[in-house]
Image (cartoon, rainbow, N blue to C red):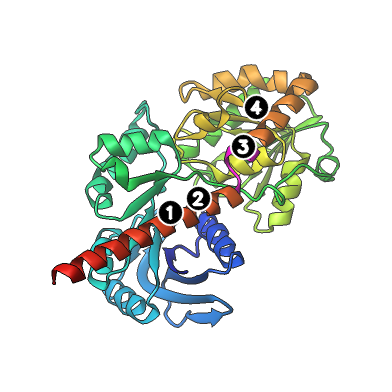
Amino acid sequence: MHIAWLGKKSPFCGNVTYGREVTNSLLDRNHQVSFLHFAQEEGDDHTWSGYQEVSLPCFYKSQIYTIPTPKASKVLTQSLRQLRPDIVHASLTLSPLDFLLPEICEELNIPLVATFHPPFDGKRRNLKSGTQIFTYQLYAPFLAHYDRVIVFSQLQRDLLVRLGVPPEKLEVIPNGVDESKYSPGLSDFKSQFKAKRLFVYQGRISAEKNVEALLRAWKQSNLGEQSKLLIVGNGPLSASLMPFYGEEYGIIWLGFIADEHKRIGILRSADVFILPSLLEGLSLSLLEAMACGVACVATDAGADGEVLEDGAGVTLNTHRVAAQLQTLLPLFRDHLEWTALLGQKARTRVLERYTLNGNITRLEKLYAEILQMQRVKLININSTA
């Protein structure tokens, strides 16, 4: 099967990781993949075994949205006409081009699948949630014209149905992790940081991630010099937070770590992973920590509460996150057996529901169903012509 994948190659974000993991897995299963991505400089196209890249011109791209040039839709249409894929899969990048894709693919008679990523708080408890709901409201009428839309949770599916997307158009296929790569194992990071208990946050340092609530709770808890909090990632709030929450409080800022082996090593050393977000989709960082057997604490924003339900972790309400963490942090420091048990349950939950292998198998089945529907549609058109 030949899949034309439309997504992001940079800057690093969950969308980029999702595209990389899925396309690599499809290649491993002997599918042909063409990767179409936005680039601010042309001439980035190249080909290697089973994989062709095509760059689409854009004025600007960030971790959140992309602004293509007027030429982008023409380049996309010409590329798809030349590539002749069996199916187009768009990992939606919050770009105006997202709204043109159904028309382009219909003109070329190519089935179109989307993965819809935007984070949300299904309970609409805050102002930022309202902004994200607007994104869902904006996209819903257009998503109805895709052959199928992949979402990460039942909560996300229910929200889109309420906004008018036909239920039969929506398919719940959660994020997945490679459980053989992300797994419990030996690591010396705890000794490197001279820690007896190691707590980790990994993600963007931005308002919706609510990292300051974690930092404030940590500072006020005064867990002692043998407990350390690692902050892995960067973002717009890093510079304003670092001066007030430094190593004197046991907080170590590591910045963005590109080396996946190092990130896995940090998770294997960690006792507790904390995600205090106000908004989420389904956090891949959370799943990676769970797969490594780390006890996990996360807010019930997006689908993260669904992931940790029934004892697979500790779920926080998005209100008063700092106060809740201030109560929990000393418990995680002092109760080693409880923490270890939560880590075991987290790993088990990933194996049951969130493996990359299971994700790709479901995706292949979805592709096959859509292609069969396309064949039937073309037969019916030809028979009435």
Mark number, residue 362: 2
Mark number, residue 218: 4
Write down the residue under mark 3. 352
Front one among 280 and 78: 78
Q: Position of residue 348 (x, y in %)?
A: 67, 34
Do the residues under discs 2 and 1 have CB atoms within 8 angstroms? yes
Q: CA distance from mark 4 to mark 3?
A: 32 Å
Query: Which residue corresponds to the image point at 20% horizontal and 71% vertical from the top-left?
Result: 382
Membership of 238 in magenta stretch = no
Dividing the picture into quarters, in which one does residue 68 lie?
bottom left
Q: Position of residue 357 (x, y in %)?
A: 60, 51
Q: Secondary structure at mark 3?
A: helix
Amino acid carrying mark 2 in the image: Arg
Q: Secondary structure at mark 2?
A: helix
Dividing the picture into quarters, in which one does residue 372 lie?
bottom left
Amino acid carrying mark 3 in the image: Glu
Q: Position of residue 366 (x, y in %)?
A: 43, 54
Q: CA distance from mark 1 to mark 3?
A: 20 Å
Write down the residue under mark 1. 366
Do the residues under discs 2 and 3 have CB atoms within 8 angstroms? no
Query: Which residue corresponds to the image point at 46% horizontal and 62% vertical from the top-left?
Result: 8
Magenta highlight: main SS: helix
**Mark 1 or mark 3, whichever is nearer to me:** 1
Q: CA distance from mark 2 to mark 1?
A: 6 Å
Going from the N terminus, do you reach mark 4 or mark 1 first?
A: 4
**Mark 4 or mark 1, whichever is nearer to me:** 1
Start and end of the magenta stretch?
350-356
Give the vertical position of 166 relative to 52 (above or below): above
